[in-house]
Every structure is written in C-alpha cells, then in structure tokens.
Amino acid sequence: MKIAVVGTGYVGLVTGTCFAETGNVVNCVDVNKAKIDQLKKGKCPIYEPGLDVLLQRNIKEKRILFTTDLKAAIDKSDIIFLALPTPPGEDGSADLKYILNVAEDLSEIIKEYKVIVNKSTVPVGTAEKVAEVLGRKLAPELFDVVSNPEFLREGIAVDDFLKPDRVVIGTSSDRARDVMNELYQPFVRQGNPIYFMDERSSEMTKYVANSYLAMRISYMNEVANLCELTGANVDLVRIGIGSDSRIGKRFLFPGIGYGGSCFPKDVLALHHTSKQNKYDFKLLDTVMKVNKNQKKVLFGKIKRFYKNSLKGKKFAMWGLAFKPETDDIRDAPALELINEILNAGAEVTVFDPEAMANVKAIFGNKIKYARDQYTGLKEADALLIVTEWSEFRNPDFERMVKNLKSKVVFDGRNVYSLEKMEELGFYYNSIGRKI
Ligand code: UGA
C-alpha cells in the first residue's frame, strides 16, 4: 500500500518504518529540513532500540522516503497518517493547531479518495473536527477520517508496533475500515485483535488506557509510602497482589513518579475533557497530585538523612532518562531532583547511558557529567539511583565502595535487594522498603 506519514517525531518515525518493513511504500514528511536531511542518510534522531537497523534497511530498499514537500508525499499515497504533536495548552487541553493546520493543507491538495488517519493522541471529537476542516473544500466521497491511537512504549516501540496487543480503529466508513483492516493484517497474524469502533470511543480508549496505567502507578506509589510507615515491604506486596489475574503482574512498580511525554500530558488532557463536560473526575485529580508528590520523595529522604544541611555535599546520580532504553528526558523525575539538589547548595555528577546530551542542553555546566558510571562516584557523599537501566542492576560493588566517600545509596527504583546492600554494609534507602 502507499502511505504518507506526516510528522517524523517519535510515533511518526516508528509508524513509518514499521509499515515500510511490512512491504508498504512510505513517504514521511516533516517541516524540519535538517531532520529530513539526516533521515535521508539513515541517521535516526532518537535513541530507540532496533529502529535504526529497520530504518536503514528500508531506505536501502526504497520503501521509506523522506521529504519536506507535503503535496508530493500526498499525491503518491492512498493512506495519510497524521503523527503530529498535541502539546498541552495553558488550560491542560491538547492543542490541535498542528493537526488542524495540516488538515487545511490537505483540503487544498487532495484530488482523489484518501484515508486520513489520526495517529496522534487527540481528544474526543477530533476526527470530526478534522473531517469538518477537510469538508470545507473537499466533497465527502474524497476522504474518510479514521482514529487509530498508538499504544507503543518508548524503548520497546518497534516490538510494540510489530506485535501489538491489539489495534484500535475508529471509523464509521466501511471503505476506510477495509483499507485499515488490510494494512494491519501483517501485525495481527498471531491472532491479536483489531477492534473496530466509532471514532469517539477510539479516541477515548487511548486516554483511558494511559490514565489507567498512570493511576496504577500512583496507587502503587501511595502503597509504597504506606509500606514504609507500617514496616511492610512493597516488593513483596506487589508480588502478592500481582498474582491475582484480575490485577496482573505488570506495571505495579513503585518509583519516583511517572514521567515521559505521554502520561503527564494525557492524564491532564482527560481531566480537561471531564471539566469541559462538567464532570468532576476526582480520581484523575488525585492521580496527578500523588505523582507530583512522589517526584519529591527521594529528595525528602536525602534531606532527612542530612538533617536539612546539604550545602557542599556531593552526589552522584545514575540515570536521567524518564525510563530505561530511551534518551527522552521529558518530564523526567531526574530534572526536578537536580534542581532541588542545586537549590540546596549541593553538587551533582550525573551519568546516563543515553540521555547525557539532552540533560547537558538544559543544565550546561551547572552540573558535572561522568565519563562512565563509576568515575562519577569519586568523592561522592552518596549515590542516587533515578532510572533503572539494566547496567545499574549488577554493578561492580567493590568499585562502588572504593570510589564513594560514604557507603550511602538512595534508590528511587528499588534496583537492589535489601539483603545484598545490608551484606555490603550500605546505608540503603529505597522506595516502600525498610531502611
Ligand atoms: C506510555 C504507555 O505505556 C504506552 O502504551 C503509550 O503508547 C505511550 O505512553 C504513549 O501514549 O505514547 P511510555 O511513556 O513510553 O508509554 O512509557 P511507560 O513504559 O508506560 O512508562 C511511563 C512512566 O511510568 C515512566 O516514567 C515509568 O518509569 C513509570 N512506571 C512504569 C512506573 O513508575 N512503574 C511501572 O510499573 C511502570
């Protein structure tokens, strides 16, 4: 099939590459010329495991092409995916200006039937808005607008796209339904379902999924805080409840708050939709409040340990990205923690396998950047673990002990066992477990 993907951000690039990988010809469009030039050379602008290999292979096979020329890409395509940003506006609502502007451009370009697919996370009613903009200049038989939300996770995006748990497609047109069904067949060979529904339910599904997952995390973070007060161990409680198939084992890990480009934005946007509809969605309000508080938990532990006197202290930080296997630092708990450390007059040397450059762009020389995970520990009063990268899980403890000034670890991700840390003689303060 012939596809155009408008927007080569995270979702657009993964979508375009994976559709090319299944034999389609994909034209990716972006207004950012520098990015398009890099992509043409096979240079991936984000760190996402496996993506660069697929990208380069499909460029070589001429199944994926990059351009800044929207018209040229549209003329060559039957299906147009919109993978554009929907940043939160001042009131928390998703800002649709990028999507609606492109819809207007499309209404000038389209001359024969196209399926226009919203891949971006967009509020309920957006498919209708896009159709309304297109319909101002185009006859109804020239287009259908479909909602097809994306459920991929950063760090495992390629796998998530190629083997989705489910595909959700919102459309009221039989013609568009057939096109989408054919397009997704290679991805559901194992029997995973494609759910067809109306556009509004499909748009809602995406927000409800992300908000539910965010709620699970906030719930477990509160449970962890209570475990600390009662002397229970949240890791054991987590395992104890996760075996109940109604609850499930996944996504129950407490930490220092959810971050990234999706959960904070999407919970806020669903909250806004509720307000717009004069519905007081109390749970969402609490999910956000709990998360805000949880981002402060690790610093609270540090402050208490040093009795509020952090001036001149030196910290080493492992992990900056909002989660492992990504260089993404949007809404990452590390950013707030660094600011708090600096405001308290302490120093921090950071290390992350992939996200250092992004953090440097924000903090510059206000903090230090370690060459590897061990050098940053030299002369540090304590180690702070902020992202659970695999390489932090089984480190050279002897080297850690040798480099650190004191055997003190504050762990926001429960990376080590309490027994191990006790055996090594560390003061070890983690989340929801005894000190
Ligand atoms: C999330 C959803 O999981 C995807 O399904 C969705 O497609 C995506 O948002 C999106 O809307 O684009 P992502 O933001 O990549 O994916 O990352 P997650 O793995 O979901 O993690 C989100 C945050 O929750 C991270 O800060 C992570 O550290 C935190 N988390 C996750 C926990 O604190 N505990 C857990 O058990 C799981």
Image: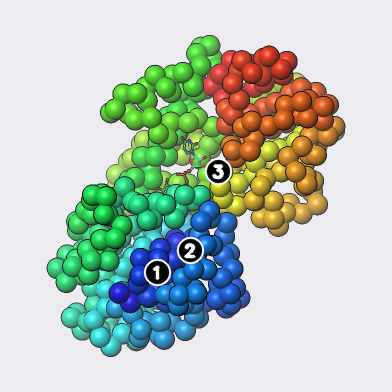
For marks 1 and 3, give the one nearer the viewer: 1
Q: Residue at x 49, y 73 (%)?
A: 59
Question: Looking at the rendered structure, which numbered label has been put on residue 20?
Answer: 1
Q: Residue at x 50, y 60 (%)?
A: 51
Badge 2 residue CB within 8 Å of ligand 1: no
Badge 1 residue CB within 8 Å of ligand 1: no
**Classed neighbour count for the residue bearing mark 2: other residues with Cα under 10 Å, few (<14), some (14–19), many (≥20):** some
Image position, residue 128 (x, y; %): 26, 67
**Labels 1 & 2 near each other (Cβ < 8 A):** yes
Tell me the CA gap for discs 1 and 2.
9 Å
Pointer 2 or 3: first along the chain: 2
The residue at which mark 3 appears reads as 323
Give the residue type that dot 3 points to. Answer: Lys
Q: Is residue 188 above or below residue 422?
A: below
The residue at which mark 2 appears reads as 54
**Labels 1 & 3 near each other (Cβ < 8 A):** no
Image position, residue 199 (x, y; %): 23, 60
